[in-house]
Every structure is written in C-alpha cells, then in structure tokens.
Image: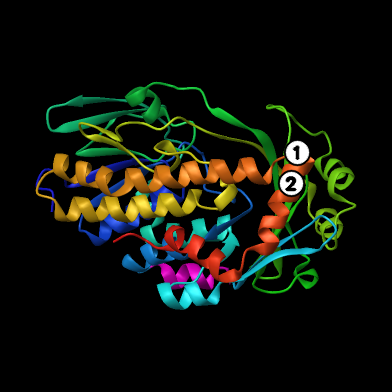
Amino acid sequence: MASDVREVLIAGAGIGGLTLACALRRQGLRARVLESAPLLGPVGAGITVQSNAMSALKRVGLDGAVAAAGAEMTRAVILTPEGKLLCETPLEPLTRELGAPSIALLRSRLHRVLLQAVGEDAVETGRAVTGYQQEGRKVCAQVKTGDPVEADLLVGADGFRSVVRAQMAGDDEPDYAGYTSWRGVSPRADLVSPGRTCESWGRGERFGIVPIGFGEVYWFAVAQAPSGGRDAEPRAALLRRFGGWHAPIRELIASTDEARIVRTDIADRPPLSCWHDGRVALLGDAAHPMTPNMGQGGCQAIEDAVVLAACLGAAPSLESALRQYERRRMARAYGVVRASRRLGAIIQGTNPLLCWLRDTGMRLTPPSAMLRKLRDTLTFPE
C-alpha cells in the first residue's frame, strides 16, 4: 500500500467517484466524497454497464448487485429507419468468454447500488470543490460551503466540466461533435423484446432502444444540430422528427413523461498528457470525456476507479501509484475516446452515398467479425 496515503478526498459523487470510494474501502483506505448537488436524487436516464465494466466491478464485489438492478443485453441489432435489418450480433458468446454480462439499467438504480455499497455517511452533499492547494504531504480542497478539507490525495471525479481538471490543466474548450442527443425512459416494456438492444440509423439521425428491466425502456435519439439548441416541447419535437420511423419508436416517445426527456449536446475534450499533479489526480469524464457512441463513458470511469484503487493498494508511494495508474489507463481510455468519435462521424453522416456504403458494409459484416471488433473494448485489461 502507498505508505503516504491514508485518506482520499473525492470531488464528485457520480459513478466514477462512488466506485472509487467503494474500491478504496476494500483497500483499507478512508474515502470522503464531496458532492456539489444539495441532494442525491434521481439523475439521467439509462446507462449500459458493459462486460469490461462488469469485470471491473467483480473485483470489488459489486457485479451481482448491478446485474440485479438492470437487464442483461443479449442481442445488439442495427436497423434502418424503416425497420429493415442491417446487422444482428449475439452477445452471449462474449459474455461466456469474458465471464461477465453487459447490463442495461436506469442510471439512478446504478447510483443507488453504489451509494448503498459506500454508505451515505461517506458522501457530503452541497459541498462543491472550487479549487485546491498543495502543501508538503497534504492537499487542501477549497469548498463552496464550509471549511477547507485536507487529505493525502484529491481525486477529481467531478465530470465533464471538472473544476479540478480546470485548475490542473487549464479550462480547455469542449470539442462539439456536431450533434445533440435526447434521452428518455418509457414504461412500455411490452413494446420491445427483452435483452434486444437496437439502433436505427438514418441520415444525420439515429434512434436507440434499450430494455432496462422493471418494465422500463431506455431510449435515445441523436441528430445533427447547432450547439446550444433547446426545445420548448421536446416530446412533440421528437415525434415530428422520428414519429415516422419504424415501430415502436413513436409509441416509446409518446409514452415518455416529458419532464424526463433530457437534451444534451455531444462533445469531448482534447487529451491530456498527464492525469495527475502531485497529490491531485483525475478520473472518468474529468480525465477523458468522450462521446457516447460506444456507451463506454461510465464503463471507462468504473475501470479508472478500480485500477486507481488497486494501484494505491499495491505501489510503495503515491507518486509511483499515480504513474502506474496513468500507464494502465491513459492509452486504453483515449483509445476509446478516439474510436467513439470516429464511430459517431460514420453513424451521423448525411451524405447519401456514404450512408449507403455504411449500411451495405453493416449488411455484409458477419456476426463473428462484429464480435471480434467488440472483444477488445469489452475486455477489462488486467
């Protein structure tokens, strides 16, 4: 165990921050989580915890609880807007090979599982980290409300607009991908097949359907759009845009509570050359924000958390632990960032010829080839 670390301060009680807190406790380290939100209420829509992240969670004993909180994904299907099949990939072979399923679930259920594991007493709400100072063998975090907090290590798990990252590496501008997304949760699980995730690809538009268990379906829509757009009536706007696509897209949109439809512009940031500075480190979206085209944002944050805790538990010093963390994680995470950006450019294409080539390529790709492409992403590196 790193001899100069006993207490770790975590900025952000999201998926990465809570997973880290759980993993640190298994290493015998104290974790203290500071969260800017005044309450830990339901957030977001759905999320996929794919085999790589489930394998990481298995290392800290959380895979069973996460699996029970969602639904296993057994088939991945790509369709045209008219519902014609482009590609169908069975996921069970990879699940057997990797020893871990891919689970889809409500984001708030995943958050609840993690919060129960770490204990609500470890999370201090309404305590936004606004900056930090390092002095000798300690780091002191400034907090918006209350006194500064001192610890042996500060981990910025404070998301896409990370304050910790901004102080460490500068507040670089987000790189807008050129498209925006809408996400929602419908109670009409009767309209879909259990375990069958689906994406339908149009020209500059797509729609995804993901059963998440408990009678619910997570859906997402993506479209080329200028950044900063807003909808006065998002459900009506989505019905105008996607209502003529194949069933059950119209029904899923129409059955979704409009208050639960979230619109988010898609962006990432330029890669950093280093994820730590002295006694401060970055994790998840604070370190490597990525587009959601591969569904790996939360998965990579989980990988980060489990690996960082393992490094702190095995290395002789904090500096060596953080360097080992970077060696094990940076190439992996940035590889997914780049792959996700490339995939988004292909899927969101608007050129008719290129879209025809894209669709034809998917029709001609055998499931075995798709599984080979997925294997590297869905394998948690030891």
Say whether residue 162 is visible.
Answer: yes
Q: Is residue 77 magenta?
A: no
Say whether residue 184 is visible.
Answer: no
- Quadrant into which the N terminus falls: bottom left
User: Residue 350 got which mark?
Assistant: 1
Residues at circles 2 and 1 in contact by the CB criterion of under 8 Å: yes
Local secondary structure at mark 2 = helix
Q: Position of residue 300 (x, y in %)?
A: 43, 51
Amino acid type assigned to the residue bearing label 1 in the image: Thr
Judging by the rendered image, the residue that carries numbered circle 2 is 355
Task: Name the residue located 85 percent from the left edge and 40 percent from the top edge.
Answer: 237
Query: For this view, does 39 lie left or right of residue 332?
Result: right
Which quadrant of the view contains residue 103? Answer: bottom right
Residue 228 vertical placement versus 364 (above, below): above
Give the camera-side residue of 254 and 137: 254
Give the camera-side residue of 53 and 40: 53
Query: For this view, does 277 lie left or right of residue 172?
Result: left
Task: Name the residue located 21 percent from the left edge and 34 percent from the top edge.
Answer: 279
Scheme by which the image is coloured: rainbow
Q: Position of residue 223 (x, y in %)?
A: 74, 40
Give the camera-side residue of 87 and 307: 87
Q: From which residue to which does the magenta span run?
A: 62-71
